Image (tube, helix red, strand yellow):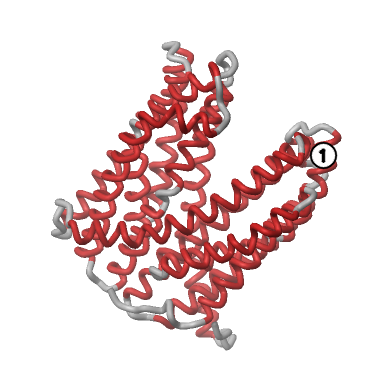
Amino acid sequence: MPLTTGTGRDDRRGRTHDREILRLAVPAFGALVAEPLFLLTDSIIVGHLPDPALGALGVASAALTALVGLCVFLAYGTTAAVARRLGAGDIRQAMRQGIDGLWLAAVIGVAIGVAGWPLAPFIVHLFGATGELATLAVTYLRVSLLGTPAMLVVLAGTGVLRGLQDTRTPLAVSVGSFVLNGLLNLWFVLGLGWGIAGSAWGTVAAQTLSAAVYLTLVVRAARRHGAALRPDLPGVRAAGTAGLALVIRTACLQIVLLVATSIATRMGEDQIEAHTIAARIWTFLAFALDAIAIAGQAITGRTLGAGDAAATRAATKRMVMWGIVCGVLFGAVVLLARPLIPRLFDADAAVTAQLMAVLWPVALLQPIAGIVFVLDGVLIGAGDQRYLAWAGVWTTLAYLPFAAMAGSLVALWLALGVWMAARMITLATRAYGTAWLVTGA
């Protein structure tokens, strides 16, 4: 990507891009943070129940998160498709794309719920749960599966609004759902005495109401612009085909993280505890960087749809700069807070020693993460899913040998650094070329 010339026009264009990035990214960050807050609230409330309720929640929520996480393409793919049509000036077809995404979400959600119900004991067993812990985990998972259609509709509905360049409404819905989830969980679990099932029912109710809000907003917009509400089978099929590539990409990400957790677990209790804390810090910082990526999805889809490849290049360069600056700042914060972090998590001396060492690679990888997350969002917005799928496979293969050779927790995180560097190379190489700059609707 060529550098700007530094002229007054370029400065004004850069400031315009900055305002647009912030307008989209800041609310997106708030909505992203709401998801871990859901789990944190559930954990606090279920923590008041007798053992092993909290452990059962951890097992069941991990399984549910993995299932729903594979369907994040419903948000990402819909954002890109809607934004591209919006940029092309075809708002009616943009809404049509959004409706197709919602139908696909509903179908997949029902399929997951139907298939997951009888498989719940098997899924829980895969996580090593036995006895009463397994029984409670199955209860939570089965109740939660009733809400999977709503959860996936929320993903698709979020994607529609992001594609329409609106990230404030998803933030408002996320905050409202978070508050409702907390109140219902308190009532169902502690007030009515429903136990861990009450926590699941509270989340299902909150997600269902959120889905109803998104459906209302999208249906109203579709009617306003004359878009049909019935499913368009070719459109739904096209959305599913495009989504398959993003499923492969997402599965590769999850494989990397699961392998890292498995290796850290085999290293010992001190190592897995330190790794868990480091991973939580990494995940929280990733939310902020992912917010820029979401802005990248929306902006890239719209500018390419409008046929303005030059604007896409300029916005991409600006977002990469934002990613690097934020990555440097986040890395500096981690290093400055490094002496305090073990106390925040009440880590003992052995865990603290492991954590203090591993926070160095966590901090130093943040600038690379800034570039990777932004370019990932840009290429998703461009509809370059097939390349992202292949890149995900190759970078995962590059990571696995280094992870297998890791003899310490620091070495394991350096292996994760190899993975991030490989992602940066594959994404930057693609972004520097022109194959992804496909303009028009």
Q: Residue 312: horizontal and vertical position, in percent?
A: 44, 76
Residue at 19% from the left image edge and 55% from the top image edge: 222
Q: Is residue 17 among the parts visible in the rendering?
A: yes
Decide which of 202, 386 is in the foreground and name it.
Answer: 386
State which quarter of the image contains the C terminus: bottom left
Residue drawn where x is 30% and y is 47% of the image: 105
| Quadrant occupied by the N terminus | bottom right
Residue located 42% across and 41% down the image? 174
* Residue 325 occupies quadrant: bottom right
Residue 65: % across, % down: 48, 40
For label 1, the residue is: 352
Up/down of 440 relative to 243, above or below? below
Helix, strand or loop at mark 1: helix
Residue 88 placement, left or right of 295? left
Q: How many marks?
A: 1
Of 398 and 63, the residue lying toward us: 398
Q: Is residue 330 above or below residue 117?
A: below
| Residue type, label 1 | Thr
Answer left or right for 281 relative to 317.
Answer: right
Residue 111 x %, y %: 30, 40
Name the side, left or right, on which 364 lies relative to 39.
right
